[in-house]
Amino acid sequence: MPFLGKDWRSPGWIWTKTENGWKRNLLYGHELGDSNVEINLQELYSNNTKNVFVGEVRELVTTKRQKDLNNYHTKSQFDFRDKWIYVQKGSTKERHGYCTLGEALNRLDFSSAIQDLRRFNYVAKLFQLIARSQLTSLSGAAQKNYFNILEKIVHKVLEDQYNPRLIKELLQDLITTLYSLTIHVGRCALVGNINIWMCRLETILKWQQQLNNMQIPKQMCNGLSFNDLPLHVQNKVIGKLSDSCDIINLGQTTPTLLVLSESRTVWKKLCHFHFSDKQFCRNLVLTKSDNVDWKLMYFTLQKHYPMKEQYGDTLHFCKHCSILFWKDCGHPCTANDPERCLVPVSPQHFIDLFKF
């Protein structure tokens, strides 16, 4: 395939048409094959001499870097016509091609999904899984869209102070992946120029610094606070939390909440929420008085088994139509009972749908 643009690696050759055909010329008009001609290097690289060769290479390299930066700052725009996609895993005579993870990332409107608090944690968890293992499988357009949405996620957290811990974990996993990819750039498939990836890495480090320096303002209220509630109400609120880090952080605020967060009942509910009875029997942790230490048991089970994921709203997959969609948006289903064909899609299941 011919190269139609300027190549930054070389300024090209100069050709002259003669009676005997085309001949390639050397610099300063020296013909090819004239081995007796000596080139004065001092004159060639002199600052006073207008060297066309060196000047053009510098210009091309500068233009290439500027083009990379312009491509990095350009926002990819996608026209979201539908809120659903057909997940096609093969190519047949009737349907050509198949749906990829990058295509699903582009066509499903995740930019609007992060504005909904019910879907925010779902999208953040999905982006974290992509950052860990699936980043190199995305196309160039999908990678650009990925970082554009990630920028909106970070800005939302900085503005609303909503769940910064989850986004910090996401950025840390992304930094670890990019460090590995940029160091071993010759051993993996990276879409795009290395300059773009270095700019992205610098931007992620800047986001991480902004999140670490984020100060949540103290809200002044004239009414009742959480500490003014009765103890049994506070205990019920703590029992509704499904994240152990939230329980521990809440217990560090006041001595009263510390006692409530260390309650055996709270950690017992947490264990029964995330794990099954069979997993309890295999990893039973007892105290000296033969009582179950539910807090220690929770962290023991956490090392061996995946925890139950709970989201306000998730993507759904229709087994009858093979369509992936947001449930409140719906899709044109042809089944007699569409509700029985719906399957909630977890972030890991979403990625598994596009593994061929």
Image (cartoon, grey):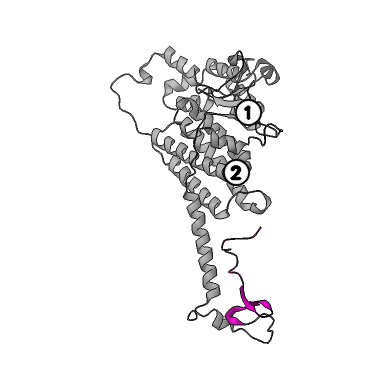
Find disc 2 in the rendering and name its residue: 139
Local secondary structure at mark 1: helix
Residue 48 showing in the rendered view:
yes
Q: Nearer the viewer, residue 126 or 216?
A: 126
Give percent across and percent down for residue 70.
48, 53
Q: As drawn, which residue projects farthest toward the left?
A: 222
Q: Amino acid at mark 2?
A: Ser
Q: Residue 214 placed where, x, y %?
A: 41, 39
Q: Which mark is residue 321?
A: none
Q: Which mark is residue 349?
A: 1
Q: In this rendering, is residue 73 above or below 218?
A: below
Span of residues in magenta:
1-30
Q: Residue at x 55, y 69 (%)?
A: 57
Name which of mark 2 and mark 1 comes first in the sequence: 2
Give the farthest residue toward the bottom. 36
Mark 2 burial class by Cα count in 10 Å: few <14, some 14-19, many 20+: some
Residue type for callout 1:
His
Could you tell me which quadrant the C terminus lies in?
A: top right
Alpha carbon distance from label 2 to label 1: 20 Å
